[in-house]
Image (spheres, grey):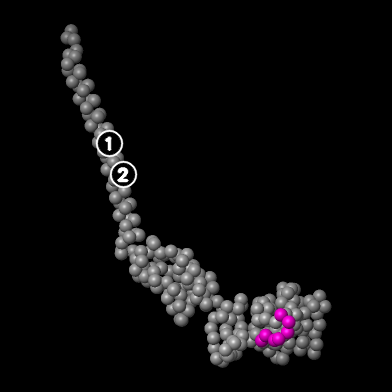
Amino acid sequence: MAEPDGGSVSTAFLSRLAARTRLRRWSRTRTVLVVVAVLVLVGALVWVVAGSSLLTVRTVQVRGVTGSLAAQVAAHADDQLDKPLARVDLDAVRRSVEEVPGAADVSVHRSWPHTLTIDVTARRPAAVVRADGGGYDVVDPTGVVLSHTAKRPSQLPLVVVGVGPGANAADGLVVLRSVPPAVRKRVQKVDVQSAQDIRLDLDRGVTVRWGSAEAGARKAQVLGALLGQKASVYDVSAPDLPTTRE
């Protein structure tokens, strides 16, 4: 029987070893190539999104309001035009828009590929107060001045501030927010004679003596019950002892 050729065995073994070595090297090389390709791709995407002019702000879209208020809101974001959308500071834009007097709740978000969208809830006019320089300021329920007009808007109640101790328009607005909605629609004037003496003049010659701005919820509840009785004066200044008068 012929003995194995040691030289042949050794050559085959070395060939297989070389093949495995080449395979491992190719595997490592392929891994490196994949990693490099991924990094290049990620870098390219980052550049496209954050650094190039391909995804810049071309439009500022304002939703929820129209007219001059929408124009004011858009003007507070015009400095974002042509900036990469990904790099827009949304919180900074929101804070800027909140400076617009008529804007209440504001949210800002990106609408890819080219739009900065601003959603706004408008402040609603609640009353008018006499302005120091003449005319009237239209205010929202918290007293924020929304506009100024020379003539009083007839559809809004007038808040009048007297000279009694502690009289101020803010308390009048608190009372206006406290009254039941059905009553609020009837209010013609809020007369703040002092901090302890606030009165509401309703339509049909009806007066509500409210007292101070405190205990508003309780007074509103009592007033709602009293309005079932015909009277010209409803006094809820002491809500546990309310009175009416013809």
Q: Which residue is mark 2?
A: 35
| Residue 27 location, quadrant | top left
**Image coordinates for residue 38, horizontal then vertical, percent:** 31, 48
The answer to whether residue 158 is above or below residue 14 is below
Q: Which residue is mark 1?
A: 27
Name the kind of residue labelled 2 in the image.
Answer: Val
| Mark 1 surroundings: few (<14), some (14-19) or many (≥20) residues within 10 A | few
**Image coordinates for residue 196, horizontal then vertical, percent:** 75, 80
> What's the magenta bit mostly, secondary-structure-wise?
loop
User: Is 19 contained in the magenta span?
Assistant: no
Left or right side of 164 for 118:
left
Say what secondary structure mark 2 lies in: helix
In the foreground, 4 or 142 = 142
**Image coordinates for residue 232, horizontal then vertical, percent:** 76, 89
Query: Can residue 181 be seen here?
Result: no
Query: What residue is rendered at 74% in x and 78% in y?
Result: 212
| Residue 190 location, quadrant | bottom right
Magenta-drawn segment: 160-166
Question: Split into 4 quadrants, where in the image is the C terminus?
Answer: bottom right
